[in-house]
């Protein structure tokens, strides 16, 4: 699991609706210390005795009361193996102490978790261009942010290169740097006040060219998808029983946000 920005109870509830049990989760990786990424992690780790992988910089800036034996430090570009998955972090631009995004690999399938990025830097471009599927931030619409009610300093913080990327910036990354084998793009971390899910979906579907586009909701879980190295994807119904299928070179992913 990457980040735990909602309550432990809500995480368990959303997983249950997907037919997934907490026994499937073996570790939590924390991208940075902002409250919308860590608010549920202490209780989650304690209740299920889950190790939390977090950099020293993020831990020092978070004041998280994690149990010492469940707190594990990680460093950028050093792969970590969890079961059959390999997780590799890479640094990014964001107004946090030591922010990272992640790629997760299994059987030559690569998934990117790339949100809270101020700009599409070389690290973001390099890792995005390797992904069969990715969670990508599309935080704000430029006009909605400019004409909205946020104070000037907050607008600058969001759009100033260490905050978030706009729909336009995310689309440019997608159209210029997606690999030909990218099967699925999950657009995430949309601003409640400065974006619109339908606007985002319509914008990206014009340029999808065979990539399945999903916009993640802040209010409910997305379905689980099986990502393969072929030209199809398999959605799993939200209320289905636990989903298993034997197929070479696959990796399941879901977003609880």
Image: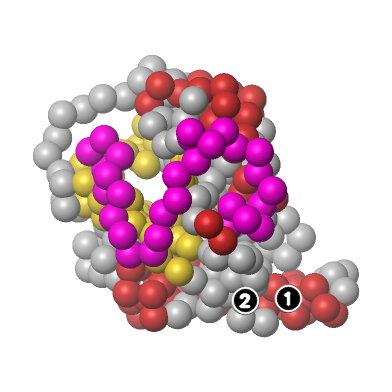
- Residue 200, visible in the rendered structure: no
For residue 162, the mark is: 2
Q: Residue at label 1? A: 157
Q: Are marks 1 and 2 in contact (CB under 8 Å)?
A: yes
User: Residue 227: x, y in percent?
Assistant: 27, 45
Q: Nearer the viewer, residue 220 or 35?
A: 35
Give me the C-alpha separation between circle 1 and circle 2.
7 Å
Q: Residue furthest left?
A: 248
Packing grade of label 2 (10 A; few <14, some 14-19, many >=20) is some
For the C terminus, the quadrant is top right
- Residue at image coords 45%, 69%: 91
Residue 22 in the magenta stretch? The answer is: no
User: Residue 154: x, y in percent?
Assistant: 80, 73
- Residue at image coords 22%, 68%: 180
**SS state under label 1:** helix
Packing grade of label 1 (10 A; few <14, some 14-19, many >=20) is some
Q: Is residue 74 left or right of residue 232?
A: right
Residue 75 in the magenta stretch? The answer is: yes
Q: Is residue 248 left or right of residue 155?
A: left
- Residue at image coords 73%, 76%: 157
Magenta segment, which residues? 58-86
User: Residue 220: x, y in percent?
Assistant: 60, 37
């Amino acid at each position: 699991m990457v980040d735990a920005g909602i309550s432990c109870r809500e995480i368990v509830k959303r997983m249950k609706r997907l037919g997934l049990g907490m026994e499937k989760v073996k570790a939590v990786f924390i991208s940075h210390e902002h409250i919308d990424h860590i608010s549920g992690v202490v209780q989650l780790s304690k209740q299920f005795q889950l190790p939390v992988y977090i950099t020293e910089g993020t831990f020092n800036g978070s004041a998280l009361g994690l149990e010492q034996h469940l707190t594990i430090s990680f460093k950028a570009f050093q792969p970590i193996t969890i079961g059959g998955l390999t997780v590799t972090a890479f640094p990014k631009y964001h107004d946090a102490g030591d922010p990272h995004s992640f790629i997760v690999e299994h059987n030559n399938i690569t998934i990117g978790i790339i949100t809270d990025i101020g700009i599409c830097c070389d690290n973001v471009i390099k890792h995005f261009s390797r992904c069969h599927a990715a969670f990508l931030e599309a935080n704000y619409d430029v006009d909605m942010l400019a004409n909205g009610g946020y104070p000037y300093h907050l607008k600058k913080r969001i759009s100033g290169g260490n905050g978030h990327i706009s729909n336009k910036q995310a689309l440019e990354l997608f159209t210029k740097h997606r690999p030909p084998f990218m099967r699925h793009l999950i657009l995430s971390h949309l601003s409640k006040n400065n974006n619109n899910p339908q606007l985002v979906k319509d914008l990206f579907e014009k340029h999808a060219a065979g990539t399945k586009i999903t916009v993640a909701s802040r209010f409910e879980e997305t379905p689980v998808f099986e990502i393969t190295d072929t030209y199809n994807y398999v959605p799993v119904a939200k209320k289905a029983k636990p989903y298993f299928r034997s197929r070479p070179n696959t990796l399941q992913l879901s977003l609880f946000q």
